[in-house]
Amino acid sequence: MGRQIFTVRIEGSPSLDWRRHYDALSYSLIDTPPHLAKCVRAYLEAFGLVFGAFDFGIDHDGRTWLYECKPNGQFAWFPEPITGRIVTAVADQLQYAGVHDAR
């Protein structure tokens, strides 16, 4: 959102499709790996976007795969404090649109 990147790690799925096992999952806000942050920013800049909800996966060899970038990603189902930080960033972007955010 804007210049901020939030990376949520989802773990604990007993199968490939984690969406079938919400109760078994854990969620944690992690530092975005620098190479991913660079790629996300380049993608958003290339398309003139201030927001994108990216889905990535990490395979058994540790390689990161981009699945998609959604224009309206859902995040309200994440637990606090993850949701609160993202909502604050969205509100800040809406309130200060066009103002350079150096954070």
Image (tube, rainbow, N blue to C red):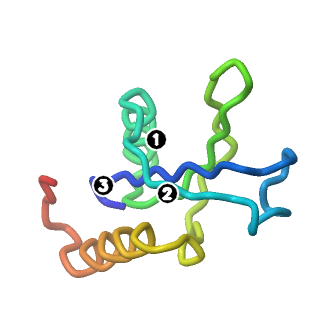
Disc 1 crowd, CA 10 A, few/some/many (<14, 14-19, 20+): some
Residue nearest the observer in this picture, 85 or 96 = 85
Residue at 39%, 69% (x, y): give it: 86
Residue at which label 2 appears: 52
- Kindly indicate whether the residue at mark 1 contacts the one at mark 2 (C-beta within 8 angstroms): yes
User: Disc 2 and disc 1: Cα gap in Å?
Assistant: 9 Å
Residue 17 vertical position relative to residue 41 in the rendered view, above or below: below
SS class of the residue under badge 2? Answer: loop
In the picture, residue 20 is in which quadrant? bottom right
In the picture, residue 103 is in which quadrant? bottom left
Residue nearest the observer in this picture, 13 or 4 = 13
Q: Earlier in the sequence, mark 2 or mark 3?
A: 3
Residue at 75%, 61% (x, y): give it: 24
Residue 4, position as x, y percentages in the image: 30, 55
Residue 70, position as x, y percentages in the image: 60, 59
Residue at which label 3 appears: 4
